[in-house]
Image (cartoon, helix red, strand yellow):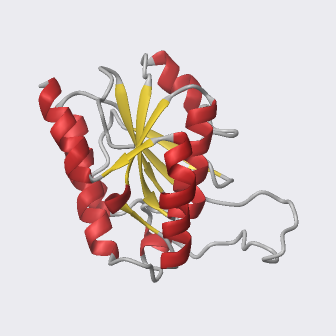
Amino acid sequence: MPVTTLDPRTALIVVDLQRGIVGLAGAHPVTGVVERATTLVRAFRARGLPVVLVTVAGAPAGRTDAGPTPLDFPDGWTDLIPELDQQPDDILVTKHSRSAFPGTRLEEHLRALDVTQVVVVGIATSSGVESTARDAHEHGFHVTLPVDAMTDRTLERHEHSVTRIFPRIAETGTTQDVLDRLGRRA
């Protein structure tokens, strides 16, 4: 479904644009994803809309077919990339799961700001972005996903989320679609 509108209190959630993850190989050039995400960050801030910066610093303890998840990260792995230009009004979330919601009080922060819609961008499409978008949808938020402001380790994973999952939980489009809707609100 195309991006139709943005609610007056829409927040931007930027998932895992941190040093350790941005440095990994992806299906799309990470520089483009970072550029589009930071364009959205600047646009949301310019309109006084909430920006949530999410990092991942651990994983759930449950066993998986993929094997154990590393819990010790090298120094600086969780540092936000400087392009995000973290500001005092940004909401910072450190997660220990794929989604930015469990155990972080993110929902409470958004509700306190009367947020009714979220735009989610970041890495990885099929993991942190998809899980956060699913949880936002389950919590009753309208969800918008600019699919050119995200990537995954493989094109297959990215495309699966974009074509099979996202249409059931969100409106999808491009960064420009979101910027156009923001411009209509100005």
Residue at left offset 19%, top offset 50%: 176
Residue at left offset 28%, top offset 73%: 31
Q: Is residue 100 visible?
A: no
Residue at the farthest bottom position: 25
From the viewer's perspective, tell me whether residue 48 is left or right of residue 172. Answer: left
Residue at left offset 57%, top offset 34%: 137
In the rendered image, which quarter is residue 126 located in? bottom right
Q: Quadrant of the C terminus?
A: top left
**The one of 32 and 142 positioned closer to us in this rendering:** 142
In the rendered image, which quarter is residue 8 located in? top left
**Taking 80 as reference, is 180 above or below it?**
above
**The one of 81 and 98 positioned closer to us in this rendering:** 98
**Taking 170 as reference, is 21 above or below it?**
below
**The one of 110 and 160 positioned closer to us in this rendering:** 160
**The one of 158 and 43 positioned closer to us in this rendering:** 158
**How far from the left and from the top, in percent, is residue 179?**
19, 43
